[in-house]
Amino acid sequence: AMSTFEGPMMSIKTVNALSHNTDWTVGHVHSGALGWVGLITIGSIYVMLPRIYNKPKMYSVSLITTHFWLATAGTIFYIVSMWISGIGQGMMWLATNPDGTLVYSFVDTVEFSHFPYIGRAFGGLLYVSGMFVMAYNVYRTIKMPEGKPVDIADPTDHEPSVDQTSTAKV
């Protein structure tokens, strides 16, 4: 959702003047790539793997939860670091002296980005750590004895479920 709001906002001319060619754009892209595409793909693997290998369930739900929080925290650290770096870069690149020369050199912006890059690396480390947790969970799931696979609902069953305990009147 954040990327969906952020992308159109970054296309506004005044915002784009600040964000263009900065780490803000990198953060924006990675919020969608790591946060949305990555986690949806990972979730799909967790759902499909027991079915593909005829297993009753994943080896450990708590490892799935650990992976989720590592990936979520990693994504947040990554994108917030890039927002800080990118907004700082944009503001430094737009700052001019009264005679029109730049206030900051390119090297100044690189030095400014050093601390946010540490946050970016930490976020990436968290995300990759989650992938190692996932790899272990997948390996242990594949090695589990076969059993009755997880039930899959019939997508052609359109009968509405009737809640016998409901007292609501329509």
Image (cartoon, rainbow, N blue to C red):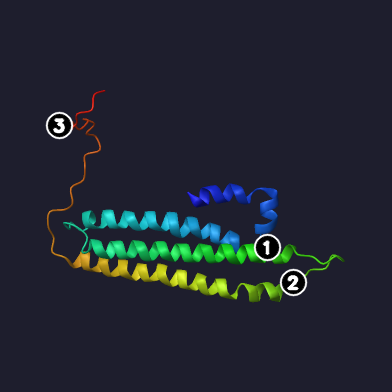
Q: Earlier in the sequence, mark 2 or mark 3?
A: 2
- At x 64%, y 73%, the residue is 112
Instruction: Specify whether 13 is left or right of 119.
Output: right
Chain-order first, disc 1 or disc 2? 1
Q: Disc 1 to disc 2, how far (Cα)?
A: 11 Å
Disc number at residue 164? 3
Q: For the residues marked 2 and 3, what is the alpha-carbon distance in whole angstroms?
A: 70 Å
SS label for mark 3: loop
Reading the image, the residue beneath label 2 is 104
Image quadrant containing the C terminus: top left
Q: Which residue is pictured at 74% across the width and 71% down the height?
A: 104
| Label 2 crowd (10 A; few <14 / some 14-19 / many >=20) | some
Please tell me whether mark 1 or mark 3 is closer to you in this view: 3
Amino acid marked by disc 2? Tyr
The quarter holding residue 152 reads: top left
User: Judging from the image, what secondary structure is the residue with disc 1 in?
Assistant: helix
Most foreground residue, 108 or 32? 108
Amino acid residing under circle 3 = Gln
Q: Position of residue 125 (x, y in %)?
A: 43, 72
> How far from the left and from the top, in percent, is residue 50?
22, 57
Label 1, on which residue?
90
Residue contact at pointers 1 and 2, CB within 8 angstroms: no
Is 39 placed left or right of 15 in the picture? left
Is 143 on the left or on the right of 114, as rendered? left
Give the residue type that dot 1 points to.
Gly
